[in-house]
Amino acid sequence: MVTLERPDPEQGGRKKKNSLLPIALISIVLCGVLTGAWLFFSPYALFNKKQLKPAKPPANQTSSSIQEPASTPAQLPSSLPSLQSDTQPPSIKEQSAPATEVPVTDQHEGKQKQCGHLAAGLRTFFTHLDRQEYIQDFHLGVPAQEYFLGLATKVLNNPPVVSRESDDLYTILTNMAHFFRVIGGKNIMIIKTILDRERDTIEDVAAELFQWTTEAQCNKEDFSFHAPLDKMYEYAGFFLSSMGGRSYLFRRDSRSRLLVNYYAILLVDRANREHINRHGINLKPLLATTIKEVENTNQLIYKEKYLDTLYTLEEKYQ
């Protein structure tokens, strides 16, 4: 009978132990390989590689944007302006504003046209006087225009006393009779009659005469009359500040007195602008008094116009 030989337990155990060692080594190697492969080919590693990899510019942009530096600086055209430094701003060429002023020739023609209009109005008034019966009764002997312009020239050439009038009684009395001494009683009567009969047009005539005498370029052959400002200023001061002039106006009607005061104030204002107010006439109190009188009267046709001018002057001399 054949007996089977039992295996040795220790020998069997060693063989079993030896058979598991290669498997363990292979497993360890495979795990290391798999771990390295996962770390290398993981999405995070791929993403980092893409971030680190420089982007290649397009071929067409590379050739056009990259240029070799020139060996010498480029020469600027001679027509271009020179370069300014950083501290100095570039100069800007100022353009001249369009001309808005009226040419001198146009201004001269405009004044001549205005003077012609004024002269025509004044000639019409004197022609009207020549036709009036009450003027013919005075037997002037010459046309009214020539007669009254002659009187005006005589009055201007014989001014009254304005300053230091009250130094003696004789000067006061002389000033009170100034017009009687210069032009006589008959001419005073003629003027008073004209002021009464021509009351509807006398304000227009006064405005035209004032504009004529205050415009330096107004001097026509058919109305040759010139009244210098310094001579008219003496009469303005006479009526506004002297006892003789004030007493003379108080003997006249209210409309004539207000017209004389109004134009006398305008003349002194013009004298102030020309720096020839040598008597030092203060318009502020005179304006207040005249404004009140004009406001309370109903004898003036252009009352509102006068008040507008006086209000403007009152603000000016505040």
Image: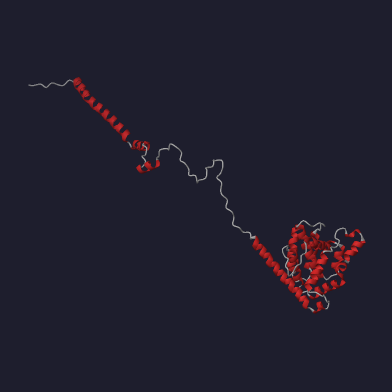
> Number of numbered discs present?
0
Residue 279, percent from left and from top: 82, 57
Q: Is residue 202 left or right of residue 57?
A: right
The answer to whether one can see residue 150 in this image is yes
**Of residues 130 and 269, which is closer to you in this image?**
130
Q: Is residue 202 above or below residue 43?
A: below
Q: Is residue 271 left or right of residue 88?
A: right
In the rendered view of the protein, which quadrant contains the C terminus?
bottom right
Q: Which residue shows up at 24% across the image and 28% down it?
A: 26
**Of residues 246 and 202, which is closer to you in this image?**
202
Q: Is residue 51 left or right of residue 100?
A: left
Q: Residue 109: which quarter of the image?
A: bottom right
Q: Of all residues shown, which one is farthest toward the bottom?
A: 133
Q: Is residue 230 above or below residue 297?
A: above
In the rendered view of the protein, which quadrant contains the N terminus?
top left
Q: Of all residues shown, which one is farthest toward the right?
A: 169
Q: Is residue 139 left or right of residue 103?
A: right
Q: Is residue 194 above or below residue 279?
A: below
Q: Is residue 259 above or below residue 16?
A: below
Residue 35, percent from left and from top: 30, 32
Residue 28, percent from left and from top: 27, 28
Q: Residue 86: which quarter of the image?
A: top right
